[in-house]
Image (cartoon, rainbow, N blue to C red):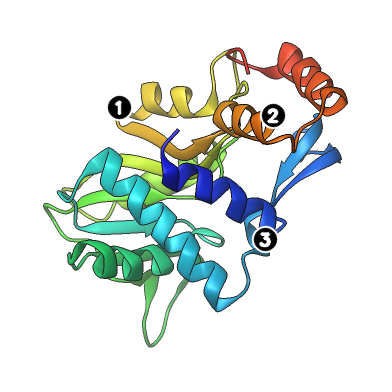
Amino acid sequence: MEAYKQEFVDFMLESQVLRFGDFTLKSGRKSPFFMNAGLYITGTQLMKLGEYYAKAIHTCYGDDFDVLFGPAYKGIPISVATTIAYSKLYGKEIRYCSNRKEAKDHGDAGILLGSPIRDGDRIVVIEDVTTSGKSMEETIPIVKAQGDVKIIGLMVSLDRCEKGKGDKGALDEIRELYGFETNAIVSMKEIIGYLVEKGVIDDELKSRIDQYYEQYGVKEV
């Protein structure tokens, strides 16, 4: 696993964004781990988060894109932080764009925040985590309605490595449905391997994680 991924796992733990215990997810699943990107709240945390996203996007998609689109609400600060980090790390000026939940009819009117989306734009969508793909059902029509654009990929911080709506993982389902690449900064498979090696995950917790993935996993974790 790349060094920046290991650093990102440590960063998630230090920020208490990734926690282990007993959690009930929005889907109703009982999970031994939980990731809450809403707990990135300080300037330093957001700066580091943007840098990790920027490194992952650069690794997966290179520089040939124009806009980072962060769906409301959590995608808004993530897209801003990553746009700043991308300029700092790679010297390329990209634009950020997000949507409003409700269109504004005065002043800075419309459904979008940040940059307009123009014909010919190449777009990377950026989110915290995708478990069902529901957010993409709302996001993709908004982006496509702005003009003749190409979505080249989706980047999330964590691939939970579990089933989405069907038997495949959520990222695989999105890839097949919309025809663009989907990637994560790090996967739970990588996290678990790293933290078992470090001794952070003990045998009892590993057993509970294994049981969870026996029921909900799409691949061996």
Instruction: Return the residue at label 1.
Output: 179
Q: Which residue lies furthest to the left in this view?
A: 120
Q: In which quarter of the image is the C terminus?
A: top right
Q: Mark 2 points at which residue?
A: 196
- Compared to residue 45, the image places residue 134 above or below, namely above
- Alpha-carbon distance for marks 3 and 2? 19 Å
Measured as percent of width and height from the top left, residue 8 is found at 53, 50
119, 169: nearer the viewer: 169
| Marks 3 and 2, the one that precedes in the sequence | 3
Sequence order check: which comes first, mark 2 or mark 1? 1
Residue contact at pointers 2 and 1, CB within 8 angstroms: no
Pointer 3 residue: 15
Residue at the location (76% across, 33% down)?
A: 201
| Neighbour tally class for label 3: few under 14, some 14-19, many 20 plus, Cα within 10 Å | some
Amino acid type indicated by mark 3: Ser
* Closer to us: 202 or 48: 202
Q: Is residue 174 visible?
A: yes
- Residue type pointed to by label 1: Gly
Mark 3 touches mark 2? (CB < 8 Å): no
Structural distance between the alpha carbons of marks 2 and 1: 35 Å
- Name the residue: 47% across, 43% down: 5
* Residue 134 image-quadrant placement: top right
